Amino acid sequence: MSYNQALNRVYAALRTSQAQTQPELAHQIGLSLPAVIQAIKRLEQIELILEDGIIRGQGRPAKRYRTSPEQHHVLSIDLGGSSLRAGLFDLYGQKLEETQGISLYRFSRLPRAEALQELKRMALHYPSAKRIGLCSPGIVRHNRLENSWLFGLQALERQTLEDTLQKPVLLENDARSAAWGEFRQGHGTDNFAFVIFAFGIGAGIVLNGQLLRGTRGAAGELSYLPQGLEGFTQPKLGALAYGFFDSLRAVSPDPTIENWESEVFHAAQQGSSQSQIAVQKAVQHIAMSLAGIITTVDPERIVLREEFPHTQELVLEPLKTMLQSIGLPTPLEVSSLGRDAGLIGMALLTAEQLEQEILAAI
């Protein structure tokens, strides 16, 4: 067995257990004690493990060792909610701190240079982060973000972000990040879909425990579905999403009002017939997107992020009824992570990449 293989086995054993002594590790993974001692020394040097007390008994005192995720930080920036959010996480995806910035509506109105500086100001709060992960609406392919309304539908290169933030950056779609967060820490299973219906309708799909990205990064971009056959002769970017929001704007047409969509749902819950009709039409757009997911990948379940008030009564239950009426009774539920799903998922993806890079560099 090579030195690197031994080192990885020692780290994997500590990664999935409580603190152990060197003899305990040697016995557990079937390596010689000298090989374990050598691996422990190197893992301490790269700060993946540390000493965690001493066991004293009848024999010689023995040091215990544990992993040290708190010694490596990543920054997660989420552009998939209602405001700019950033969180500092350790190597295993535990949140340490969080900052909330300007609304995404305001962010989307900034010139490109000012938007990048806004991200830089957010990142400067967390100098200990070794990597930065950023998730956003739009298609992510070949290390760049495309067709995102946050950046005027103009492509944003990862290199541009790295030049601005002065750190390695990982880019991902917001729905896929949220799906990974739900998969690792929420209601996700090895085969499920996570659906967002905030500033568009998008899905993050996990198949056999892996994120589905597609050949060109478009997997799950449900907003592009045309609303009818005329959509192919008069295409409109994000047609399904526009239909979703047009239904709501018919009641509250001013998108500059903070939380304007939530006000429509509040009014529907309070009995406003006009708002109820608007919400019903919006939910029909979601139902069309879910039917597309179910008939394509047939997931075990679909998890919805709770975007607006009363999602359970006004969205989830009607969706179940509509899907069952066409013979697609796939289980639906609301995310256990809520709005944190994208922030957590992006942190996990970034931390996993950092951990792999540290181990690969040994």
Image: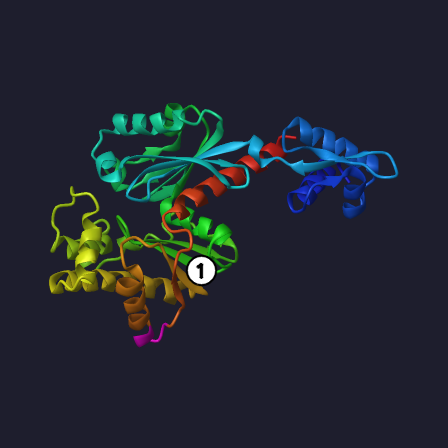
* Residue 293 picture location, percent across and down: 36, 62
Could you say where residue 65 lies in the image, as x and y percent from the top left?
A: 71, 36
Lateral position of residue 86 relative to residue 104, left or right? right
**Quarter where residue 64 is shown:** top right
Nearer to us in this view, 244 or 24:
24
Locate residue 62, reporting x and y percent. 80, 35
Decide if residue 311 is on the left or right side of residue 132. left
Q: Is residue 362 above or below residue 286?
A: above
Whether residue 129 sits left or right of residue 306 in the image: it is right
Indicate the secondary structure of the residue bearing disc 1.
strand
Q: Position of residue 108 (x, y in %)?
A: 23, 36
Give the extent of the magenta segment.
324-328
The residue tagged 1 is 192
Extreme residue in the right direction: 59
Residue 13 or 174: which is nearer the viewer?
13
Picture layout, residue 354 above or below residue 232: above
Residue in the picture at 45% in, 49% down: 181
Of the 4 image quadrants, the one containing the C terminus is top right
Q: Which quadrant is home to the N terminus?
A: top right
Q: Residues within 10 Å of mark 1 (few under 14, many from 20)?
A: many
Left or right relative to 324: residue 32: right
2 above or below 45?
Answer: below
The residue located at (79%, 43%) in the rendering is: 24
Residue 247 visible: yes
Tell me the chief SS of the magenta region: loop
Judge whether residue 153 can be spotted in this image: no
Query: So how many labels did they put on this image?
Result: 1
Q: Is residue 180 magenta?
A: no
Instruction: Residue type at mark 1: give it.
Output: Phe
Q: Identify which residue, 95 or 201, lies in the foreground.
A: 95
Residue in the image at 42% along x and 55% along y: 336
Displayed quadrant of residue 312: bottom left
